[in-house]
Amino acid sequence: MDSLEAIEQLKDLIEDRKSFDKDKIWDRDIEALKIGIAAIEKQIPKSTYWENSKNGKIYDFGWFCCPKCNEMVDDFEEWKFCPSCGQALKWGEDE
Ligand SMILES: [Zn+2]
């Protein structure tokens, strides 16, 4: 099972819990599953993107941003993880 399959499996579990949760007894299970999904998703590298505007102002230089939290990330170091949110980063073209 790879990460994407694990996420699908966990999402199925959430739907399963929700389907018979009229008394909200599975709320903590559902919350834990959602946290697990978010943690796995952060480990799957996502491509950085190029930005040259902020708050409506366009600059004559640009910078790379995290696809998850949109904070600036350092392309010189090509960080493996976003220092702001922990998202695994991918540099260059998507395969
Ligand atoms: Zn981030």
Image (cartoon, rainbow, N blue to C red):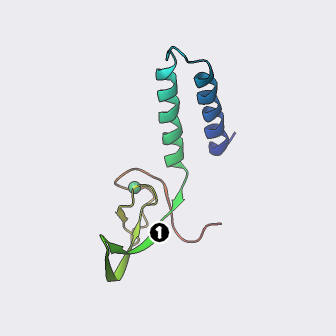
> In which quadrant will I find the C terminus?
bottom right
Residue shown at 45% from the left, 52% from the top: 87
Secondary element under disc 1, as helix, strand or loop, is: strand
Q: Position of residue 85 (x, y in %)?
A: 38, 50
Residue shown at 51% from the left, 67% from the top: 91
Is the distance from the Cβ of mark 1 to the nearest ligand 1 atom less than 8 Å? no
> In which quadrant will I find the N terminus?
top right
Residue at the limit of the structure toward the right, as seen here: 1
Count the marks: how many? 1
Q: Alpha-carbon neighbours of circle 1 within 10 Å: few (<14), some, or many (≥20)?
A: some
Left or right: where 4 falls relative to 88: right
Q: Position of residue 88 (x, y in %)?
A: 48, 54
Residue shown at 64% from the left, 45% from the top: 4
Residue at the limit of the structure toward the bottom, as seen here: 60
Q: Quadrant of ligand 1?
A: bottom left
Relative to 79, say whether 42 is above or below.
above
Closest to the observer: 75 or 10? 10
Relative to 3, say whether 48 is above or below.
below
Left or right: where 38 falls relative to 3: left
Q: Position of residue 19 (x, y in %)?
A: 62, 23
Residue type, numbered disc 1: Tyr
Residue shown at 35% from the left, 75% from the top: 53
Residue occupied by mark 1: 49
Relative to 70, say whether 18 is above or below.
above
